[in-house]
Image: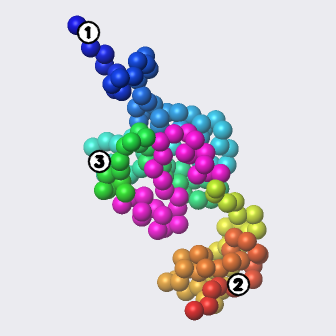
């Protein structure tokens, strides 16, 4: 008697479910052909690679991006979760994705800075009296001028 190797018992389909490798390939194909405002690449894990690093890294509209690709019911390991949390804490975008649609939704919600260039941002932070070296990250998060209103400094007051 011949047994089917289908991963979904009870379903009579000829296609097997997508593997993480195929999902990654679809996502990378989408990113490279469609997303013109960013640069993305696959991390190939090897003997000396950092454990837990996301599968796809890149930069989109000036933001660091990390995508950990999983099958729809796949779970993140502790180290993968920790890596994504560290990226978020540093101001990057880090998410578990299961499809091209997940990536599209995430990238559609990334705002583009239209008011100032990086050079102006650094000059602004250097000139701003509230941005000491310890406060720069907090200042960037709190200052409404950096990404929305121009060069006038209006940080949140405590």
Nearer mark to the viewer, of 2 and 3: 2
Q: CA distance from mark 2 to mark 3?
A: 44 Å
In the image, 23 versus 115, the foreground residue is: 23
Asked whether, in this view, residue 76 is left or right of residue 106, the answer is left
Q: Which mark is residue 2?
A: 1
Asked whether, in this view, residue 120 is left or right of residue 91, the answer is right
Percent x, y of residue 17: 42, 28
- Residue positioned 59% across, 59% down in the render: 63
Asked whether, in this view, residue 49 is left or right of residue 124, the answer is left
- The reply to whether residue 13 is visible in this rendering is yes
**Residue picked out by circle 3:** 48
In the image, 114 versus 100, the foreground residue is: 100
In the image, 136 versus 98, the foreground residue is: 98
- Residue positioned 71% across, 77% down in the render: 145
Asked whether, in this view, residue 83 is left or right of residue 27, the answer is left
Sooner in the amino-acid sequence: mark 1 or mark 2 = 1
User: With respect to residue 120, does 133 lie above or below?
Assistant: below
Sooner in the amino-acid sequence: mark 1 or mark 3 = 1
Q: Residue furthest front?
A: 10
Nearer mark to the viewer, of 1 and 3: 1
- The reply to whether residue 40 is visible in this rendering is no
Magenta stretch in the rendered image: 82-108
Sooner in the amino-acid sequence: mark 2 or mark 3 = 3
- Residue positioned 60% across, 48% down in the render: 105
Q: CA distance from mark 1 to mark 2?
A: 72 Å
Q: Is disc 3 placed on a helix, strand or loop?
A: loop
Q: Which mark is residue 153?
A: 2
Percent x, y of residue 84: 42, 58
């Amino acid at each position: 008697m011949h047994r089917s190797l289908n991963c979904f018992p009870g379903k009579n389909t000829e296609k097997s479910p997508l593997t993480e490798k195929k999902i990654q390939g679809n996502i990378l194909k989408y990113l490279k052909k469609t997303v013109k405002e960013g640069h993305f690449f696959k991390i190939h894990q090897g003997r000396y690679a950092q454990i837990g690093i996301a599968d796809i890294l890149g930069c989109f509209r000036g933001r660091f991006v990390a995508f950990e690709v999983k099958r729809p019911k796949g779970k993140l390991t502790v180290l993968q979760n920790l890596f994504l949390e560290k990226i978020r804490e540093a101001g990057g975008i880090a998410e578990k994705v299961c499809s091209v649609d997940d990536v599209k939704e995430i990238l559609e919600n990334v705002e583009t800075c239209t008011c100032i260039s990086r050079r102006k941002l650094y000059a602004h932070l250097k000139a701003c009296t509230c941005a000491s070296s310890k406060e720069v990250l907090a200042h960037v998060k709190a200052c409404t001028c950096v990404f929305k209103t121009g060069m006038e400094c209006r940080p949140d007051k405590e």
